[in-house]
Amino acid sequence: MSPSRRSDSETDADTEVNIDASSHADATVSESTQPQISSYTAPSRSAPLAARGRLVGGSALIGMMMSGTSVLVSMGIVGIATAADTAFLFGTLALGFGTLGWAASIAAGPGMAAMQAHLETTTDWDEMDSRRAMARIGGCGAGVMIAAIVIGIAFGYR
């Protein structure tokens, strides 16, 4: 098509439309498009902190019970030094895995969510649950370490 000949649709696209800005300044947004503001009150800062403390503290208690049982049972077989050291090392392994997994959940969370949306999977995985699970593993590891130290000192480990 030559530059001198243009179709009607091309001419319409090139036509300038002058809109008076003052006519739109007084326009109102309909009720249905305005965001509805409910009587939402933000939770206090201590509520999430208390929930996180219960999660990690409960896991630490479970870890302490596991470590206490394993150290007390195995110290009769291998001695207090080896039993306490082994329990402490397993605790550091769990704490390290939990910390690394928690950080990886934060880093990879948006990517995992995007991949799930792209692949249209129906899994229940989400970043929050992954971080919660890793916090439990880390708390359990910390509890194992604490109990191994306390029991080792109580039974004469120097």
Image (cartoon, helix red, strand yellow):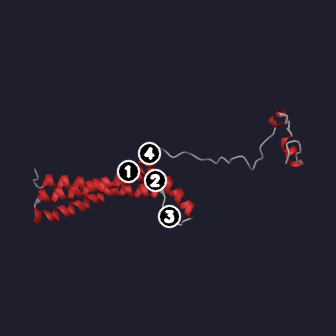
Mark 4–mark 2 distance (CA, rounded to whole Å): 28 Å
Q: Determine which quarter of the picture holds residue 90.
A: bottom left
Viewer-nearest of labels 1 and 2?
A: 2
Residue marked by disc 2: 108
Image spot of residue 11 (x, y percent): 87, 44
Q: Which residue appears at 79% of the width and 41% of the height?
A: 28
- Tell me the number on the disc at residue 3: none
Q: Which residue appears at 36% of the width and 52% of the height?
A: 100
- Tell me the number on the disc at residue 53: 1
- Tell me the number on the disc at residue 46: 4
Q: Which residue appears at 85% of the width and 48% of the height?
A: 1
For residue 79, side relative to residue 97 (left or right): left
The amino acid beneath tag 2 is Ala
Q: Secondary structure at mark 4?
A: helix
Quick one: label 2 or label 3, which is nearer the N terminus? 2
Mark 3–mark 1 distance (CA, rounded to whole Å): 25 Å
